[in-house]
Amino acid sequence: MTGTSTVGGGVRDVFATAQECFLRKDLEGFAELFAEDGVHELPFAPPGVPGYLKGRERIKQYLTSIEDAPLEIREFVDLTVHDTADPDVILAEYTARGIVTRGKQPYEMRYVQLLRVENGRIAVWRDYWSPLDGMRALGVLGMISTVIRSRLHRAQSRRQKR
């Protein structure tokens, strides 16, 4: 069973488009998939990374602040998508494989995500990624510098709005 939303496609179509955005490292394009009041949740976010973002613009601010993270996803493997009783909700499990751009070493990161689509846009994207996998890929210093860049970008965005 696929989702019934029509504006941007069903839930599986929106998920496929999101994965295409990740492969292109088009995080702004991913943010545009969200409803105006959509929610991006990161329940296992490490300190310094927001665990709850509401609103397309806020999500876009956060995602564009991490666009220069030194991870490049090359492929998604072991993808399993689970339909739910709600046709606009899926659960997806997969592994992202790619490289750490500094040094070109390979990495893998497992994801479990809940996706709710309403009117063809992401209403909820709950992303259960492992910060431990992030630290394995980037190293502790790389993870810390990514968090710091994210916080600096958010502070600059807030100052510009004033």
Image (tube, rainbow, N blue to C red):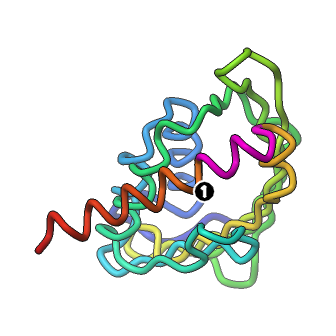
Determine the residue located farthest toward the left in the rendered image.
162
**Residue at figure coordinates x 74%, y 27% from the top left:** 98
Please tell me how crowded label 1 is: few (under 14), some (14-19), or many (20+) other residues with Cα within 10 Å. Answer: many
The one of 117 and 2 positioned closer to us in this rendering = 117
Q: What residue type is labelled 1?
A: Arg
Question: Where, by quadrant of the figure, is residue 109 drawn?
Answer: top right
- Foreground: 78 or 30? 30
Secondary structure mostly seen in the magenta stretch: helix
Residue 118's x, y, as percent?
44, 77
Relative placement, left or right, of 13 versus 136 is left
Residue at image location 26% in from the left, 62% down from the top: 157
Which residue is disc 1 drawn over? 12
Horizontal side of 15 relative to 37 (left or right) equals right
**Bounds of the magenta segment:** 138-145
Q: In the rendered view of the protein, which quadrant contains the N terminus?
A: bottom right
Query: Is 152 covered by the magenta stretch?
Result: no
131 is higher (above) or lower (below) than 105 = below
**Which residue is at 34% across, 56% downward?**
32
User: Residue 146, image x and y in percent?
Assistant: 58, 48
Q: Residue at x 11, y 74 (%)?
A: 162
Residue 94 coordinates in the image, percent (x, y): 82, 48
